[in-house]
Image (cartoon, helix red, strand yellow):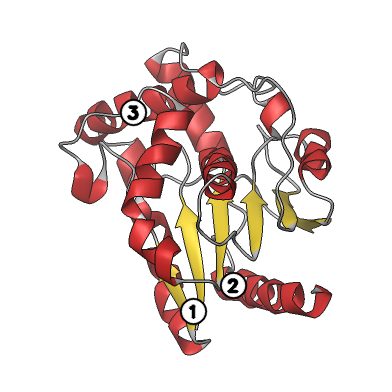
Amino acid sequence: MKTLICFPSSGSSSSLFAPWKLFFEQKNIALICPEYPARGRRFNDPPTKSIDALAQDMMHQLQDELKNNEDYHLFGHSLGGIVAYELALKIQQSPYKAPKSIFISSSHAPHKREETSLKSHLSDSELIVALKQIGGLKQEVLNHPELMELVLPIIRADLALNEHYQISKKVPLSCPITTIHGTDDPVVKLEYIKEWKHYSEDYQHINWPGDHFYFQPDLERFLTALATSLEAVYKRD
């Protein structure tokens, strides 16, 4: 059975992908969604201080899966894109089998991470306006002061991870990379997503109508296309 391992965006938990599970079960694809510290079922864990530490945490969570599974793919959305990349680098330096492919969604290439208007130093009101623009959070959450008091520190910590992330050189992966961009994304630029072409000899790109969370309005259509893209990886082997 194929396995898809998914990594969420800033401020999100593994629940971002909960609506995907039944669809992929029907396609005979297992869905695994490790949890970042400080949210979801790990709400009481302290947040990590760097992308490298977060990728190491994911490596630890997934070690049994990586040890026993040779037919898996990675999908990272927004912050999750760079987490998936750093995890793949760690896997390349380990005895584990590399992923069959990586899907990078709404996420600038590693050497273009600073090119974003979504910054941790924004005031609460500025950050809430930005979050409304990119989508992802339900309106009832955005309009609930007590909930936002819990959510905003997590989002800020994740944005800071991105701001402090640096690479010394472009290290390519041994597996194919497919990038996906919402054509109306207000914070992620197409030209900086396409810079992922430097990180794999097998690179493809998909434009999808919508904002930063382009997959949410017509989820079944998107997941059908994603499942088709997973199958296409094997045809390219």
User: What mark, if any, has residue 223 been given in the picture?
Assistant: 2
x and y, in percent, of residue 39 in the image: 26, 41
The kind of residue tagged 2 is Leu
- The residue shown at (72%, 53%) is 174
Q: Would you say 111 lies left or right of 158 here? A: right
| Quarter of the image where one finds residue 152 | top left
Is residue 11 visible in the rendered structure shown here?
Answer: no
Q: How far apart are marks 2 and 3 (CA)?
A: 30 Å
**Residue at mark 1 to residue at mark 2: CA–CA distance:** 8 Å
Query: Would you call the spot at circle 3 few (<14 residues within 10 Å), some (14-19), or many (20 or more)?
Result: some
Residue drawn at the location 56% of the way across and 44% of the way down? 93
Q: Is residue 175 placed above or below 153 in the rendered structure?
A: below
> Where does the image place residue 26, in percent across and percent down from the top left?
47, 88
Determine whether label 1 and label 3 are within 8 Å by CB.
no
Residue 217, given in percent of the width and then of the height, sits at 57, 62
Nearer to us in this view, 48 or 141: 48
1 and 2 marks in contact (CB < 8 Å): yes
Residue 48: which numbered mark, if any?
Answer: 3
Q: Is mark 3 on a helix, strand or loop?
A: loop
Sooner in the amino-acid sequence: mark 1 or mark 3: 1
Q: Given contact means CB atoms under 8 Å apart, are the residues at marks 2 and 3 in contact?
A: no
The image quarter in which residue 188 lies: top right
Q: What element carries label 1?
A: helix
Label 1 or label 2, whichever comes before in sequence order = 1
- Residue 24 circle label: 1
Give the residue type that dot 1 points to.
Phe
Q: How crowded is mark 1: few (under 14 residues within 10 Å), some or many (20 or more)?
A: some
- The picture places residue 236, in percent across and down from the top left corner, at 82, 74
Mark 2 vs mark 3: in front: 3
Nearer-the-camera pick, 130 or 61:
61
Answer above or below: position of 139 versus 46.
below
Disc 3 residue type?
Thr
